[in-house]
């Protein structure tokens, strides 16, 4: 399938539907793609590998089956496996227990942040339920589309906790409407597709999952045909600028492009334009 992503993931399905495009599906449809301990690990490993994989220029992220994601797997719970478990010697005081809980949350945050930091655009295709950790995942993506039956719920307050792996940090910046973001976070109420579009959580709505995936894959293929230097630079610059002042962002892009202007892709694109041909770019 690709140079870097060679191993199969237990909870993710990977397909390469077009050149430069990787389609990643959350793949626990029988559990509504609830995020279990294995999926936390798989998401981090998968998106860290995509970052280093020059066969992949754009990613589509969707859910297998009839839902995008029902949030944290409430049956399997939090990842107490694979190195994230606490030492078992007794007695453990509150500080010692707290230390490992803190480390675990930081590790889970990395699973979601790996999507944002993957440097290739990630287009999220959401159908039906997008709950809790599903919203964490969706808001870490670059672009969000959904079906008309989609709904979004920041469900964490209903299970007695503040969302802690990205939604509260990213959603207000994604939608720009702080009041709406806070309303959803405090109430856990469902926002339906039309409302998500109205407030900018998604940028398009489709009638059904086939239309949703067809369009999202087409957009990903269009992006994958562009200069990978230009596209990955654009994501890097957008992410940096979101979290810094305009002047800091301008300084960052000036420095970044001091290096990235030295790509063959600029000459290639201009020469192709003058010859009235479509440019073909080499891998990153
Ligand atoms: C450090 C912490 C890091 C991250 C924390 C994240 C927190 C969260 O994600 S909070 C959100 C947790 N998720 C939920 O609260 C969603 C709960 N589920 C539902 O609300 C509904 O099931 C539904 C997804 C809206 C679907 O409703 P419906 O179509 O009516 O189906 P059900 O009969 O309710 O469910 C069918 C079947 O699926 C099981 N299931 C649903 N969601 C989960 C889940 N999140 N985890 C585990 N299992 C889930 C449900 O129990 C049913 O199973 P049965 O065995 O058939 O009873």
Image (spheres, rainbow, N blue to C red):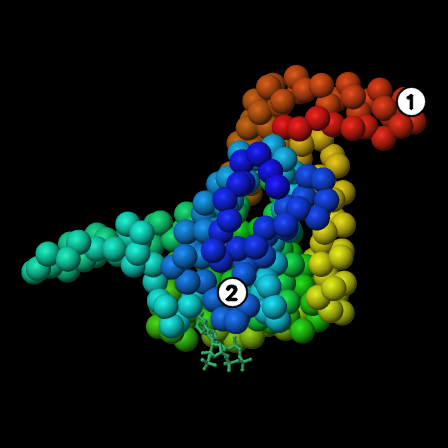
Residue wearing tag 1 = 275
* Residue 226 % position (x, y): 74, 34
Toward the viewer: 124 or 88? 88
Which of the pair 242/179 is nearer the observer?
A: 242
Q: Residue at x 74, y 64 (%)?
A: 210
Residue name at image x 59 percent, y 19 percent: 259
Relative horizontal placement of residue 147, taking residue 75 as reference (left or right): right
Residue 252, image x and y in percent?
A: 55, 28
Local packing at callout 1 (Cα closer than 10 Å; few below 14, some 14-19, many 20+) is: few
- Whether residue 200 is visible, yes or no, is no
Can you give x and y, in whole percent of width and height, for residue 30 in the image? 52, 71
In the rendered image of this protein, does residue 210 appear above or below residue 115?
A: below
Rendering quarter of residue 222: top right
Report the residue at 70% width, 71% height from top: 148
Residue 76 horizontal/vertical position (percent) = 36, 68
| Residue bearing the label numbered 2 | 28
Indicate which disc, 2 or 1, sits on the residue closer to the N terminus. 2
Q: Is residue 48 left or right of residue 280?
A: left
* Quarter of the figure that contains the N terminus: top right
- Residue 23 higher or lower than 71, as above or below: above
Label 2: which secondary element? loop
The C terminus appears in which quarter of the rendering?
Answer: top right
Q: Which type of secondary structure does the marked residue at label 1 adopt?
A: loop
Residue at image position (54%, 59%) is: 26
Does residue 270 appear anywhere in the picture?
Answer: yes
């Amino acid at each position: 399938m690709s140079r870097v992503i060679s191993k199969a993931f237990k909870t993710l399905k990977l397909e390469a539907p077009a050149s430069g495009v990787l389609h990643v599906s959350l793949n626990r449809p029988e559990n509504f793609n609830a995020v279990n301990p294995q999926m936390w690990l798989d998401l981090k490993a998968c998106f860290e590998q995509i970052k280093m994989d020059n066969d992949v220029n754009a990613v589509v992220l969707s859910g297998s089956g009839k839902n995008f994601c029902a949030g944290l797997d409430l049956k399997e719970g939090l990842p107490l496996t694979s190195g994230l478990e606490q030492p078992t010697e007794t007695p453990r005081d509150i500080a010692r227990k707290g230390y490992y809980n803190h480390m675990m949350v930081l590790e889970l945050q990395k699973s979601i942040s790996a999507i944002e930091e993957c440097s290739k655009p990630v287009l999220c295709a959401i159908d039906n339920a997008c709950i809790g950790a599903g919203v964490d995942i969706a808001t870490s993506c670059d672009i969000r589309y959904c079906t008309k039956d989609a709904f979004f719920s920041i469900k964490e307050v209903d299970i007695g906790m503040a969302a802690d792996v990205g939604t509260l940090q990213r959603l207000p910046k994604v939608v720009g409407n702080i009041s709406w973001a806070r309303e959803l976070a405090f109430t856990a109420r469902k926002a339906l597709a039309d409302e998500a579009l109205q407030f900018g959580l998604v940028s398009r709505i489709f009638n059904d999952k086939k239309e949703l995936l067809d369009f999202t894959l087409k957009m990903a293929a269009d992006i994958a045909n562009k200069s990978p230097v230009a596209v990955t630079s654009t994501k890097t610059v957008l992410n940096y600028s979101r979290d810094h002042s305009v002047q800091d962002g301008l300084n960052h892009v000036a420095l970044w492009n001091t290096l990235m202007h030295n790509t063959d892709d600029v000459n290639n694109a201009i020469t192709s334009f003058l010859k009235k041909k479509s440019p073909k770019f080499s891998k990153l």
